[in-house]
Every structure is written in structure tokens, then in C-alpha cells.
Amino acid sequence: MTVDVRTEMVIDRPREQVAAFAGDPGRAPEWYINIREVRWQTEPPLRVGSRMEFVAHFLGRRLVYTYEVLEYQPGERLVMHTAQGPFPMETTYTWTDADGGHTLMTLRNRGNPSGFAKISAPVMEAAMRRANRKDLALLKALLEAQ
């Protein structure tokens, strides 16, 4: 079963500002509820081939995984993937202009779980959907408070 979770949020800030904040992996712990820490494995700045280790807690488990940037178009699109563990994942951020100087941010997570993760995929997908909504709501609140 493929897990594919897509979440969107309109943020009352210009696209460049939203993309600069959300597209900086070092800031992920500020707006991702489950991410505790990010450690660069390659030197910043962000570019295709950059690698970062993420430490997260999800469904009661501590997860450590490395994302590699596959595609990066500053201010428009960021695609990262991890091939580690039982749930290889691709994460895509897109930022587009919305009416009134707002930004539509889309967060998409998709992957093909294996082993036990394959059995629990429907539960994981629902939990990811809830977490993504909370993450984007927190991002919106942080940026709109500035």
C-alpha cells in the first residue's frame, strides 16, 4: 500500500518569506511537532544533494533518518527523500502565490512502507494527516505572528 498524504494551508505572508522559513531544514523543529532535532550531514546552504539527519518522535517511537534533497527551486519547490528504515519517504513542499499576497503551501508525504509498517500503513497515514495539519497550522501561526 502506498501512503500519500497531501496537506495545504494558506499563510498570510509572501511566498518568499514562507519558503525561506519552511524550506530551511534547521527550522523544522520550530514548526514540526514531531521533529526534535536536525543535524546537517553536508555543509549548508541547501542544494540538490544536501543531506540532513532528522530526529523525530512519531506514534510513540523515536525515529532517526537522513533526508537527501532531490530537487530544490528556491521559493517554489523542495523535494527530499529518505530510503532508510521500514518506511522510505519522499517529502515535497511547494509554495505558490495566493490572492492578497498570501502563500499556498502544500506539504506532501508519500512512500511505500514494508514489513510491519506495511500492515500499519492505514493507521500511519491517518496519523500523518493529523500531524501535517498541526504542523502547517503551527507554521501559519508562527509566520503570521511576525
Image (tube, rainbow, N blue to C red):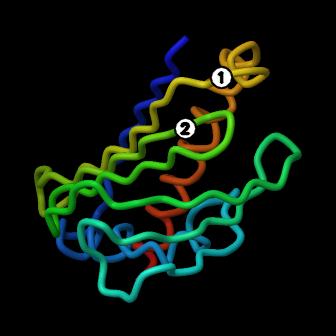
SS category of the residue bearing label 1 = loop
Crowd around label 2: few <14 · some 14–19 · many ≥20 (10 Å): some
Q: Is residue 84 above or below residue 47?
A: above
The image shows a total of numbered marks equal to: 2
Which image quarter holds the C terminus?
bottom left
Residue at the disc numbered 1: 114
Check contact, mark 1 vs mark 2: CB within 8 A. yes
The front one of 75 and 100 is: 75
Q: What residue lies at 88% left-to-right and 45% top-to-bottom?
A: 60
Q: What residue lies at 15% left-to-right and 52% top-to-bottom?
A: 96
Q: Quadrant of residue 31?
A: bottom right
Q: CA distance from mark 1 to mark 2?
A: 9 Å
Q: Tell me residue 11's x, y (percent).
A: 32, 58
Residue at the disc numbered 2: 88
Hey, what amino acid is under mark 1?
Answer: Ser
Hey, what amino acid is under mark 2?
Answer: Pro
SS category of the residue bearing label 2 = loop
Crowd around label 1: few <14 · some 14–19 · many ≥20 (10 Å): some
Q: Tell me residue 141's x, y (percent).
A: 50, 66
Q: What residue lies at 71% left-to-right and 70% top-to-bottom?
A: 36
Q: Is residue 111 above or below residue 12?
A: above
Q: Is residue 22 above or below residue 127?
A: below
Q: For this view, does 138 lie left or right of residue 15?
A: right
